[in-house]
Image: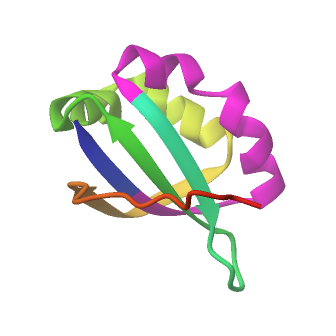
Amino acid sequence: MVNVMTEFEVEDIDKFKEGIEKYGVDLRERHGCLSVQWFRIVAPGNRVIAVVKWESREHYETFLKDPAVGQAMYARGTLNIDKITYMEQLGEWKADKIP
């Protein structure tokens, strides 16, 4: 398994949020995506970070090469991907009690 963090700019945050479930769900599943978390960078502009768990780096790279992925990203207003970081999880901590 590999975690991939991507940072990118979107045309409009609301359009992007609507498009998350509308465009690309089947593509992510087909190419081995296990989960995704999206974060809006709290600063001026429309910047987003996605943290995605993939079955493998190869699965992610195949996903990027699929022409339908570019179409889905365009449909939800993704303008460009500025940074891709491959990450390996070292550990995790969860509180016993969550209010």
Residue 49 on image: x %, y %: 52, 62
Does the magenta-highlighted stretch encompass residue 21?
Answer: yes
Residue 27 on image: x %, y %: 47, 20
Residue at the far front in the pictured view = 96
Q: Give the side of residue 31 with respect to residue 88, left or right.
A: right
Q: Residue at x 50, y 54 (%)?
A: 50
Residue 7 on image: x %, y %: 46, 64
- Quarter of the picture containing the N terminus is top left
Give the quarter of the image for residue 24: top right
Using the image as rendered, state which of residue 72 and residue 90 is in the foreground: 90
Q: Residue at x 70, y 30 (%)?
A: 21
Q: Give the side of residue 76 with respect to residue 37, left or right.
A: right
Using the image as rendered, state which of residue 6 and residue 37 is in the foreground: 37
User: Compared with residue 1, is residue 90 higher up or lower down, i.e. above or below?
Assistant: below
Q: Residue at x 75, y 47 (%)?
A: 17
Q: Give the side of residue 31 with respect to residue 15, left or right.
A: left
Q: Give the side of residue 8 with respect to residue 22, left or right.
A: left
User: Compared with residue 28, is residue 8 higher up or lower down, i.e. above or below?
Assistant: below
Highlighted magenta segment, given as a residue range? 6-33
Residue 14 on image: x %, y %: 83, 53
